Amino acid sequence: MLLDSLIDKATRDDRSTVAIAAADTAEVIEAVIDALIRNLAEFILFGDKEKITSLIKLQKPELLNNHKLKIIHTDSVGDAAKSAVQSVSNKQANVLMKGNIPTNILLKAVLDKEYGLRTGNVLSHIAFFEIPGFNQLLLVTDAAMNIAPDLVQKAQILRNAVTLAKSVGIEFPKVAVIAAVEAVNPNMQATLDAAALTMMNKRGQISECIVDGPLGLDNAISDIAAEHKGIKSDVAGKADILLVPTIEVGNVLYKSLIYFAQAKVGALLAGASAPIVLTSRADSAESKLYSLALALCCVKK
Ligand SMILES: CCCC(=O)SCCNC(=O)CCNC(=O)[C@H](O)C(C)(C)COP(=O)(O)OP(=O)(O)OC[C@H]1O[C@@H](n2cnc3c(N)ncnc32)[C@H](O)[C@@H]1OP(=O)(O)O
Protein backbone atom coordinates (compact mmCIF):
# COMPACT_ATOMS: atom_id res chain seq x y z
CA MET A 1 0.00 0.00 0.00
CA LEU A 2 1.27 3.50 -0.85
CA LEU A 3 0.09 6.99 0.11
CA ASP A 4 -2.13 7.55 -2.97
CA SER A 5 -4.26 4.62 -1.86
CA LEU A 6 -5.13 6.59 1.31
CA ILE A 7 -6.64 9.31 -0.86
CA ASP A 8 -8.70 6.71 -2.73
CA LYS A 9 -9.83 5.20 0.58
CA ALA A 10 -10.78 8.63 1.99
CA THR A 11 -12.61 9.69 -1.19
CA ARG A 12 -15.30 7.06 -0.67
CA ASP A 13 -16.75 9.07 2.20
CA ASP A 14 -17.16 12.85 2.17
CA ARG A 15 -19.20 13.33 5.35
CA SER A 16 -16.34 14.76 7.41
CA THR A 17 -15.66 18.35 8.38
CA VAL A 18 -12.09 19.49 8.98
CA ALA A 19 -11.28 22.47 11.24
CA ILE A 20 -7.94 24.10 10.36
CA ALA A 21 -6.10 26.23 12.93
CA ALA A 22 -4.37 29.16 11.17
CA ALA A 23 -5.11 28.20 7.57
CA ASP A 24 -3.23 31.16 6.10
CA THR A 25 -0.46 29.60 4.02
CA ALA A 26 -0.34 28.72 0.35
CA GLU A 27 0.43 25.01 1.06
CA VAL A 28 -2.56 24.61 3.41
CA ILE A 29 -4.89 26.36 0.94
CA GLU A 30 -3.54 24.24 -1.91
CA ALA A 31 -4.26 21.06 0.08
CA VAL A 32 -7.77 22.32 0.96
CA ILE A 33 -8.54 23.15 -2.66
CA ASP A 34 -7.30 19.76 -3.80
CA ALA A 35 -9.39 18.05 -1.12
CA LEU A 36 -12.51 20.06 -2.07
CA ILE A 37 -12.10 19.20 -5.73
CA ARG A 38 -11.81 15.51 -4.80
CA ASN A 39 -14.87 15.81 -2.50
CA LEU A 40 -12.86 14.56 0.46
CA ALA A 41 -14.48 16.73 3.16
CA GLU A 42 -15.95 20.09 4.18
CA PHE A 43 -13.69 22.71 5.80
CA ILE A 44 -13.83 25.42 8.44
CA LEU A 45 -10.75 27.63 8.13
CA PHE A 46 -9.77 29.64 11.23
CA GLY A 47 -7.25 32.48 10.95
CA ASP A 48 -6.65 35.81 9.23
CA LYS A 49 -9.74 36.00 6.96
CA GLU A 50 -8.26 38.59 4.61
CA LYS A 51 -5.10 36.54 4.05
CA ILE A 52 -7.00 33.25 3.64
CA THR A 53 -9.44 34.86 1.17
CA SER A 54 -6.66 36.35 -0.93
CA LEU A 55 -4.80 32.99 -1.02
CA ILE A 56 -7.95 31.25 -2.27
CA LYS A 57 -8.55 34.05 -4.82
CA LEU A 58 -5.05 33.51 -6.17
CA GLN A 59 -5.48 29.74 -6.59
CA LYS A 60 -9.19 28.98 -7.21
CA PRO A 61 -11.47 32.03 -6.72
CA GLU A 62 -14.69 30.15 -7.60
CA LEU A 63 -14.27 28.08 -4.41
CA LEU A 64 -14.95 31.18 -2.26
CA ASN A 65 -18.68 30.57 -2.85
CA ASN A 66 -18.49 26.84 -2.20
CA HIS A 67 -20.89 25.81 0.59
CA LYS A 68 -18.33 23.23 1.78
CA LEU A 69 -15.90 26.00 2.79
CA LYS A 70 -16.36 28.37 5.73
CA ILE A 71 -13.81 30.98 6.87
CA ILE A 72 -13.85 32.28 10.45
CA HIS A 73 -11.65 35.23 11.36
CA THR A 74 -9.43 35.02 14.45
CA ASP A 75 -7.03 37.69 15.71
CA SER A 76 -4.06 35.51 16.72
CA VAL A 77 -2.68 31.98 16.31
CA GLY A 78 -3.68 31.28 19.92
CA ASP A 79 -7.31 32.20 19.11
CA ALA A 80 -7.19 30.17 15.91
CA ALA A 81 -5.98 27.12 17.87
CA LYS A 82 -8.63 27.53 20.57
CA SER A 83 -11.52 28.10 18.13
CA ALA A 84 -10.50 25.23 15.86
CA VAL A 85 -10.17 22.82 18.81
CA GLN A 86 -13.51 24.01 20.22
CA SER A 87 -15.22 23.42 16.88
CA VAL A 88 -14.09 19.79 17.11
CA SER A 89 -15.04 19.34 20.76
CA ASN A 90 -18.53 20.75 20.08
CA LYS A 91 -18.85 18.44 17.05
CA GLN A 92 -19.07 21.09 14.31
CA ALA A 93 -15.99 19.37 12.86
CA ASN A 94 -14.61 15.84 13.28
CA VAL A 95 -10.97 16.34 12.21
CA LEU A 96 -8.53 18.99 13.46
CA MET A 97 -5.67 20.17 11.25
CA LYS A 98 -2.59 22.23 12.08
CA GLY A 99 -2.01 25.18 9.77
CA ASN A 100 0.53 27.98 10.07
CA ILE A 101 1.00 27.68 13.82
CA PRO A 102 3.75 26.40 16.15
CA THR A 103 3.09 22.78 17.14
CA ASN A 104 3.22 23.42 20.89
CA ILE A 105 0.54 26.17 20.73
CA LEU A 106 -1.85 23.81 18.95
CA LEU A 107 -1.00 20.92 21.29
CA LYS A 108 -1.61 23.02 24.40
CA ALA A 109 -5.10 23.83 23.08
CA VAL A 110 -5.66 20.13 22.30
CA LEU A 111 -4.69 19.25 25.89
CA ASP A 112 -6.80 22.01 27.48
CA LYS A 113 -8.88 20.48 30.29
CA GLU A 114 -11.96 22.60 29.55
CA TYR A 115 -12.40 22.46 25.78
CA GLY A 116 -9.58 20.16 24.55
CA LEU A 117 -9.68 16.74 22.93
CA ARG A 118 -8.29 14.56 25.73
CA THR A 119 -9.56 11.01 26.17
CA GLY A 120 -7.39 9.82 29.08
CA ASN A 121 -5.18 8.09 26.52
CA VAL A 122 -1.65 9.15 25.56
CA LEU A 123 -1.75 11.29 22.41
CA SER A 124 1.02 10.46 19.96
CA HIS A 125 2.28 11.33 16.50
CA ILE A 126 2.53 8.75 13.72
CA ALA A 127 4.08 9.49 10.33
CA PHE A 128 3.55 7.29 7.25
CA PHE A 129 6.48 7.48 4.83
CA GLU A 130 6.62 6.47 1.19
CA ILE A 131 10.35 6.27 0.47
CA PRO A 132 11.77 5.99 -3.05
CA GLY A 133 13.28 2.50 -3.51
CA PHE A 134 11.43 1.10 -0.48
CA ASN A 135 8.33 -0.80 -1.55
CA GLN A 136 6.09 -0.41 1.49
CA LEU A 137 4.85 2.34 3.79
CA LEU A 138 7.06 2.81 6.84
CA LEU A 139 5.49 4.24 10.01
CA VAL A 140 7.57 6.30 12.44
CA THR A 141 6.40 7.22 15.93
CA ASP A 142 6.73 9.64 17.78
CA ALA A 143 8.49 12.51 15.97
CA ALA A 144 6.41 15.41 17.24
CA MET A 145 4.51 15.15 20.53
CA ASN A 146 6.01 13.03 23.32
CA ILE A 147 9.42 14.44 24.19
CA ALA A 148 11.02 11.62 26.21
CA PRO A 149 8.37 8.96 26.79
CA ASP A 150 8.77 6.45 29.65
CA LEU A 151 7.99 2.74 29.26
CA VAL A 152 4.27 3.11 29.98
CA GLN A 153 3.98 5.95 27.48
CA LYS A 154 5.98 4.01 24.88
CA ALA A 155 3.60 1.06 25.25
CA GLN A 156 0.65 3.39 24.59
CA ILE A 157 2.42 5.11 21.68
CA LEU A 158 3.02 1.67 20.20
CA ARG A 159 -0.66 0.67 20.65
CA ASN A 160 -1.80 3.92 18.99
CA ALA A 161 0.42 3.18 15.99
CA VAL A 162 -0.84 -0.40 15.73
CA THR A 163 -4.48 0.77 15.84
CA LEU A 164 -3.79 3.36 13.15
CA ALA A 165 -1.91 0.86 10.97
CA LYS A 166 -4.87 -1.51 11.20
CA SER A 167 -7.35 1.23 10.30
CA VAL A 168 -5.59 1.71 6.95
CA GLY A 169 -5.31 -2.02 6.27
CA ILE A 170 -1.90 -2.98 7.72
CA GLU A 171 -2.96 -6.02 9.73
CA PHE A 172 -0.67 -7.41 12.44
CA PRO A 173 2.16 -4.93 11.85
CA LYS A 174 5.78 -5.71 12.68
CA VAL A 175 7.11 -3.18 15.17
CA ALA A 176 10.84 -2.49 15.62
CA VAL A 177 11.77 -0.69 18.82
CA ILE A 178 14.76 1.37 17.79
CA ALA A 179 17.93 1.90 19.81
CA ALA A 180 21.61 2.47 19.03
CA VAL A 181 22.50 -1.20 19.55
CA GLU A 182 20.83 -4.61 19.43
CA ALA A 183 22.08 -5.85 22.80
CA VAL A 184 20.55 -4.70 26.07
CA ASN A 185 22.89 -2.18 27.68
CA PRO A 186 21.88 -1.09 31.19
CA ASN A 187 23.40 2.34 30.49
CA MET A 188 21.08 2.88 27.52
CA GLN A 189 17.48 3.30 28.68
CA ALA A 190 16.20 2.86 25.11
CA THR A 191 17.52 -0.73 25.06
CA LEU A 192 15.94 -1.59 28.42
CA ASP A 193 12.56 -0.19 27.35
CA ALA A 194 12.81 -1.99 24.00
CA ALA A 195 13.45 -5.33 25.71
CA ALA A 196 10.54 -4.73 28.10
CA LEU A 197 8.17 -3.85 25.23
CA THR A 198 9.23 -7.00 23.38
CA MET A 199 8.44 -9.10 26.46
CA MET A 200 5.12 -7.25 26.99
CA ASN A 201 4.21 -8.28 23.45
CA LYS A 202 5.23 -11.92 24.06
CA ARG A 203 3.08 -12.00 27.22
CA GLY A 204 0.04 -10.45 25.51
CA GLN A 205 0.21 -7.03 27.21
CA ILE A 206 0.67 -5.48 23.77
CA SER A 207 -1.32 -7.36 21.15
CA GLU A 208 -2.26 -7.44 17.47
CA CYS A 209 1.34 -6.90 16.34
CA ILE A 210 4.82 -8.46 16.61
CA VAL A 211 7.31 -6.37 18.57
CA ASP A 212 11.08 -6.79 18.59
CA GLY A 213 13.84 -4.67 20.05
CA PRO A 214 16.26 -3.29 20.70
CA LEU A 215 17.07 -3.05 16.99
CA GLY A 216 19.31 -0.57 15.20
CA LEU A 217 17.62 1.26 12.32
CA ASP A 218 19.69 -0.75 9.80
CA ASN A 219 18.58 -4.10 11.23
CA ALA A 220 14.96 -2.99 11.44
CA ILE A 221 14.67 -2.23 7.74
CA SER A 222 17.39 -4.28 6.01
CA ASP A 223 17.47 -8.10 5.87
CA ILE A 224 21.11 -7.94 4.80
CA ALA A 225 22.14 -5.80 7.78
CA ALA A 226 20.23 -8.09 10.15
CA GLU A 227 21.86 -11.19 8.62
CA HIS A 228 25.33 -9.63 8.98
CA LYS A 229 24.76 -9.32 12.72
CA GLY A 230 23.22 -12.80 12.99
CA ILE A 231 19.92 -11.38 14.24
CA LYS A 232 17.08 -13.91 13.99
CA SER A 233 13.79 -12.12 14.32
CA ASP A 234 10.33 -11.94 12.73
CA VAL A 235 10.66 -8.16 12.62
CA ALA A 236 14.28 -7.48 11.61
CA GLY A 237 14.51 -6.41 7.97
CA LYS A 238 10.71 -6.22 7.63
CA ALA A 239 9.51 -3.62 10.11
CA ASP A 240 6.26 -1.78 9.34
CA ILE A 241 6.52 0.52 12.38
CA LEU A 242 9.62 2.11 13.92
CA LEU A 243 9.10 3.15 17.54
CA VAL A 244 11.86 5.66 18.30
CA PRO A 245 13.13 6.42 21.81
CA THR A 246 12.82 10.23 21.85
CA ILE A 247 11.34 13.13 19.91
CA GLU A 248 14.81 14.14 18.68
CA VAL A 249 15.45 10.75 17.10
CA GLY A 250 12.00 10.75 15.48
CA ASN A 251 12.14 14.35 14.31
CA VAL A 252 15.58 14.02 12.75
CA LEU A 253 14.53 10.76 11.05
CA TYR A 254 11.31 12.44 9.79
CA LYS A 255 13.15 15.39 8.29
CA SER A 256 16.06 13.26 6.98
CA LEU A 257 13.67 11.02 5.08
CA ILE A 258 12.02 14.06 3.48
CA TYR A 259 15.11 16.15 2.72
CA PHE A 260 17.75 13.47 2.00
CA ALA A 261 15.61 10.64 0.64
CA GLN A 262 12.81 12.69 -1.02
CA ALA A 263 10.24 10.65 0.89
CA LYS A 264 6.55 11.55 0.82
CA VAL A 265 4.79 11.71 4.16
CA GLY A 266 1.35 11.76 5.71
CA ALA A 267 1.12 12.22 9.47
CA LEU A 268 -1.31 12.63 12.31
CA LEU A 269 -1.83 12.56 16.06
CA ALA A 270 -3.77 9.63 17.47
CA GLY A 271 -5.25 9.06 20.91
CA ALA A 272 -7.40 12.22 21.01
CA SER A 273 -11.20 12.29 20.65
CA ALA A 274 -10.70 13.09 16.93
CA PRO A 275 -7.84 12.61 14.47
CA ILE A 276 -5.45 15.56 14.33
CA VAL A 277 -3.48 16.33 11.16
CA LEU A 278 -0.05 17.41 12.28
CA THR A 279 2.62 18.05 9.69
CA SER A 280 5.59 20.36 9.76
CA ARG A 281 4.76 23.88 8.55
CA ALA A 282 7.45 23.41 5.87
CA ASP A 283 5.87 20.19 4.55
CA SER A 284 4.46 20.33 1.01
CA ALA A 285 0.79 20.69 0.03
CA GLU A 286 0.97 17.07 -1.17
CA SER A 287 2.05 15.91 2.28
CA LYS A 288 -0.78 17.90 3.90
CA LEU A 289 -3.24 16.22 1.52
CA TYR A 290 -1.90 12.74 2.39
CA SER A 291 -2.16 13.57 6.08
CA LEU A 292 -5.70 14.77 5.62
CA ALA A 293 -6.61 11.57 3.78
CA LEU A 294 -5.05 9.53 6.57
CA ALA A 295 -7.12 11.40 9.19
CA LEU A 296 -10.30 10.99 7.16
CA CYS A 297 -9.67 7.22 6.99
CA CYS A 298 -9.61 7.19 10.82
CA VAL A 299 -12.70 9.28 11.60
CA LYS A 300 -15.20 7.46 13.76
CA LYS A 301 -18.69 8.11 12.40
C1 LIG B 1 7.19 16.20 12.79
C2 LIG B 1 6.66 17.40 12.16
C3 LIG B 1 6.15 18.45 13.05
C4 LIG B 1 7.20 18.96 13.97
O1 LIG B 1 8.34 19.12 13.65
S1 LIG B 1 6.69 19.26 15.52
C5 LIG B 1 8.02 19.95 16.37
C6 LIG B 1 8.31 19.35 17.67
N1 LIG B 1 7.19 19.23 18.59
C7 LIG B 1 6.97 20.07 19.62
O2 LIG B 1 7.57 21.12 19.77
C8 LIG B 1 5.97 19.62 20.65
C9 LIG B 1 6.67 18.79 21.72
N2 LIG B 1 5.85 18.62 22.90
C10 LIG B 1 5.60 19.62 23.79
O3 LIG B 1 6.02 20.76 23.61
C11 LIG B 1 4.84 19.26 25.01
O4 LIG B 1 4.98 17.93 25.35
C12 LIG B 1 3.30 19.58 24.88
C13 LIG B 1 2.63 18.57 23.98
C14 LIG B 1 3.07 21.00 24.34
C15 LIG B 1 2.69 19.51 26.28
O5 LIG B 1 3.43 20.37 27.06
P1 LIG B 1 2.85 21.04 28.40
O6 LIG B 1 1.61 21.80 28.10
O7 LIG B 1 4.00 21.73 29.06
O8 LIG B 1 2.44 19.74 29.09
P2 LIG B 1 2.76 19.04 30.44
O9 LIG B 1 3.80 18.01 30.17
O10 LIG B 1 2.96 20.01 31.55
O11 LIG B 1 1.34 18.37 30.62
C16 LIG B 1 0.13 19.11 30.71
C17 LIG B 1 -0.98 18.11 30.77
O12 LIG B 1 -1.12 17.49 29.49
C18 LIG B 1 -0.94 16.07 29.62
N3 LIG B 1 -0.19 15.57 28.47
C19 LIG B 1 1.02 16.00 28.05
N4 LIG B 1 1.40 15.30 26.97
C20 LIG B 1 0.40 14.40 26.75
C21 LIG B 1 0.20 13.39 25.80
N5 LIG B 1 1.12 13.11 24.87
N6 LIG B 1 -0.94 12.67 25.84
C22 LIG B 1 -1.88 12.91 26.77
N7 LIG B 1 -1.75 13.86 27.70
C23 LIG B 1 -0.62 14.58 27.69
C24 LIG B 1 -0.15 15.89 30.90
O13 LIG B 1 -0.36 14.61 31.44
C25 LIG B 1 -0.71 16.98 31.77
O14 LIG B 1 -1.95 16.55 32.27
P3 LIG B 1 -2.48 17.01 33.73
O15 LIG B 1 -2.58 18.50 33.67
O16 LIG B 1 -1.44 16.54 34.70
O17 LIG B 1 -3.80 16.34 33.85
Image: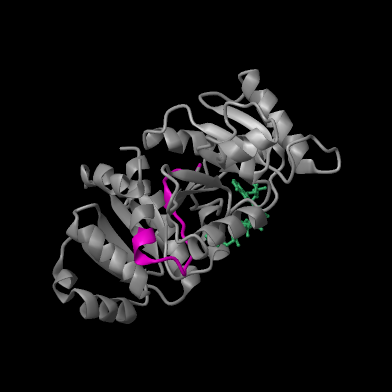
Residue 218 in view: yes
Q: Which one is in front, 212 or 80? A: 212
Q: Is residue 230 magenta?
A: no
Quadrant for the N terminus, please: top left
The magenta segment: 271-288
What's the residue at 37%, 47% (across, down)? Answer: 294
Q: Which coloring applies here?
A: one colour
Taking the image as shown, residue 215 lies to the left or right of residue 167, namely right
Q: Residue at x 68, y 51 (%)?
A: 246
Residue 63 image offset from top left, x and y in percent = 17, 69
Q: Which is the main secondary structure of the residues drawn in magenta?
A: loop
Q: Position of residue 133 (x, y in %)?
A: 43, 50
- Quadrant that contains the C terminus: top left
Q: Which picture quadrant has residue 120?
A: top right
Residue 272 lies, with reference to residue 210, above or below; the image says below
**Residue visible at 32% across and 45% down?**
6
Q: What count of labels does the image hold?
A: 0
Task: Single out the residue that lies furthest toward the top.
Answer: 203
Where is 257 relative to 102, above or below? above
List x then y, in percent, for residue 42: 24, 56
Give the percent coordinates (x, y) of residue 231: 67, 30
Q: Is residue 241 left or right of residue 267?
A: right
Ligand 1 quadrant in view: bottom right
Q: Quadrant of residue 58?
A: bottom left
Q: Is residue 272 visible?
A: no
| Residue at the image position 37 percent from the left and 74 percent from the top | 24
Q: Look at the image and say whether residue 287 sits in the magenta stretch.
A: yes
Relative depth, front residue between 226 and 235: 226
